[in-house]
Image (tube, grey):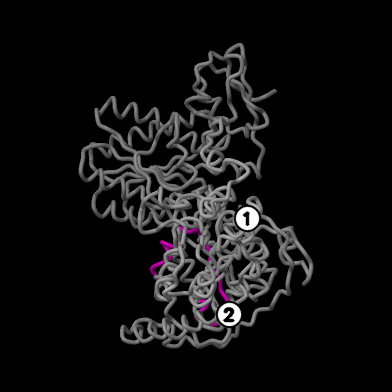
Amino acid sequence: MSRVFEKIVSGKPGERRFFLGNEAIARGALESGIDVYTFYPGTPSSDVGEIFMEIFRDAGMKWTETSINEKVALEVAGSAYARGAKSMCGMKNVGLNVASDPFFALATTKPKNENSAMVVLVADDPEQHSSAVEMDSRHFLKLLKVPALEPGNAQECLEFTKEAFRISKKLKIPVILRTVTNVAHARGGVELGEIQKSEIKDVFDLSKEVNVASRLYFLELKNEQIFNRMHQALEISENTPLNFIANDQSENEYQFGIITSGVSFSYVNEALEFLNLTAPILKIGMINPLPEQKIANFLGKFKQILIVEENDPYLETQILGIAHKHKIEVKIFGKDPYSYQKDDALLPQVGELDPTKVALAIAKITKITPKLDLQKIINTKYDVMKRKPVLCPGCPHMTTGFSLTKAVKRIKNKTKKEVYFFQDIGCYTLLAFPPLGFANVKYCMGSSIALAQGVAQTSDSLNIAMIGDGTFFHSGLPPLINAVYQNAPILLLLLDNGWIGMTGQQCDAGTNTEHYSEGKYKTRIPLEKVVESIGAKLDIYRKRDDGEKNTRRLTKLIEEAGIDVIENRNTHVILIQDECIQKSKKRYTGLVREVDRDKCINCGTCYRQLACPAISVRDEKSDIDPGLCLGCGICEEVCPAKAIGVKK
């Protein structure tokens, strides 16, 4: 058995393990008898899917897959749920946008099969550590009208996952499990329970309750969803121990209480300890539907309440409504959601919270003088070494960036046209940073191709879109079809490194099936055949070791294709195939390079233009760190002084 299997599956009931939040979620799903897990990789949720991809066959599950995108993942898991499986679907916050179309129908349907249960893991990313935008997914809860739980530590990740499956099985409605980065990627002690065997049956009922083709019947189901299943969910929320009051018997002279959820509960406890203050805390674990009566009873005990939550005032807005409905006279502090005045809010709506920010908010309400100047701590800008995001040493995207720089200069000189760049989501997004700067516009997954079209159809400039293979399969196909259909004059650089690189090198539909264990059960889809079938003009670049410079070949290819687009107003694709160095290095060892300091002229080609992070300047000469160099050899071929060679 694999190391992951031993860690996640082998533990016995009562045993304690030191788990990431994501590892605890996987274990909780196994203790619920999960049959199916589908996902699209997206930090901070990816680990759960990677765990199941490695263990699902040995763990007795029916199926796990890295789906093409979140919409497909939700539909596959949703269909399994409809036929009687316990299924789970994982994604990051923005992935819920992609999955939302089928989710509205899925949330309304009601399977008849006894075992049917479905949990949707949605991992938010406050502070936008690894996301295109900072988005609070909780707003979808009111739109979808589904129950939702929010754990705040690793033990809760396990327990809340099990409770989510129990609620879903009882009510026959999907349940969202919402996490954030500081829960998904934080470790903590976890007490294990017993892993349950699958209860899926071979005979199942795909009744009309899972079919929304009839408008009138769908409306009946929607009424039933709201006034029956969600009403039952409200009763659960009012009585579940997931919503509890900490420090229930404590009192303070300020008639002050706190309402919070998730990881913010930890921040609140640290802040109170720092201020030497005790206060009752209503910790909400079931964040939809909110326990209205429990909240109203809590509000009625105090004159002042602080709502502590990260990102948008989701809880605060509803709690203000509850206070108004129950005619409770209490001052509610937090983010002041209706003023849109930063100075009126005690807590920010952007970024992560921490104990210092929470302590400052409490101090302002209670007039307590803290031992330290908290505002000064928050405002202090520390003089730390600046480090820009960089590609990995040997990353094939450096070859693309270097060649694109030279090709664009030639195109501009020959055509006198402006050139604009449209980025997508992936490692190659880092080409937007200096010294390259290849990004005028970037929105979201798959948007680069359509963004390029919008400018191309309204100007005579050259518009270059860049997209990776994983992102292209995810959501790049429709805009490329549109480009060919509309005769959009754009140049698309399709950067095929064979993996979904930025989220941890997961496989995609174009990955060589010989390079990963699940590949023997998959069929590879060649990108060149996909592009050709759409009808775009196609050129293919593959890295070679035949003596001809790779950068020279790619530069020429980009130059010719760019001029072709300008002159003939067509859709032109260059498929750049060069495997992710983090995966290829596991199968072969590259030859580390070194600099001949006598020949080096310190021109900066290798460390400034190629911008390889393994190369720096030492004593006015280029210097290659042998501990970082992975032997791609591109620095050797671009060096004009021939000062770089294989390390002796």
Quadrant position of the C terminus in the picture: top right
What residue sits right under mark 1 in the picture?
272
Of 523 and 205, which appears nearest the observer? 205
Q: CA distance from mark 1 to mark 2?
A: 27 Å
User: What residue do we see at 44% from left, 60% from top?
Assistant: 313
What residue sits right under mark 2 in the picture?
239
Q: Secondary structure at mark 2?
A: helix
Farthest top residue in view:
598
Q: Is residue 211 above or below residue 644?
A: below
Q: Splitting the image into 4 quarters, where does residue 20 fall?
A: bottom right
Q: Which residues are magenta?
A: 80-102
Is 82 a magenta residue? yes
Q: Splitting the image into 4 quarters, where does residue 25 fall?
A: bottom right
Q: How far across and down, in percent of the image, does residue 201 sit?
A: 60, 85
Quadrant position of the N terminus in the picture: bottom right
User: What residue do we see at 48% from left, 32% from top?
Assistant: 550
Q: How far across and down, in percent of the image, does residue 44 sit?
A: 56, 55
Q: Is label 1 or label 2 in front?
A: 1
Of 341 and 134, which appears nearest the observer? 341
Q: Earlier in the sequence, mark 1 or mark 2?
A: 2
Q: Secondary structure at mark 1?
A: helix
Q: Splitting the image into 4 quarters, where does residue 298 fall?
A: bottom right
Q: How far across and down, in percent of the image, does residue 610 sit?
A: 49, 28
Is 300 a magenta residue? no
Q: Is residue 488 above or below residue 607?
A: below
Q: Answer left or right for 273 relative to 453.
A: right
Of 486 and 130, which appears nearest the observer? 130
Q: Is residue 542 above or below residue 75?
A: above
Which amino acid type corresponds to the residue marked 1 in the rendered image? Leu
Which amino acid type corresponds to the residue marked 2 in the rendered image? Asn
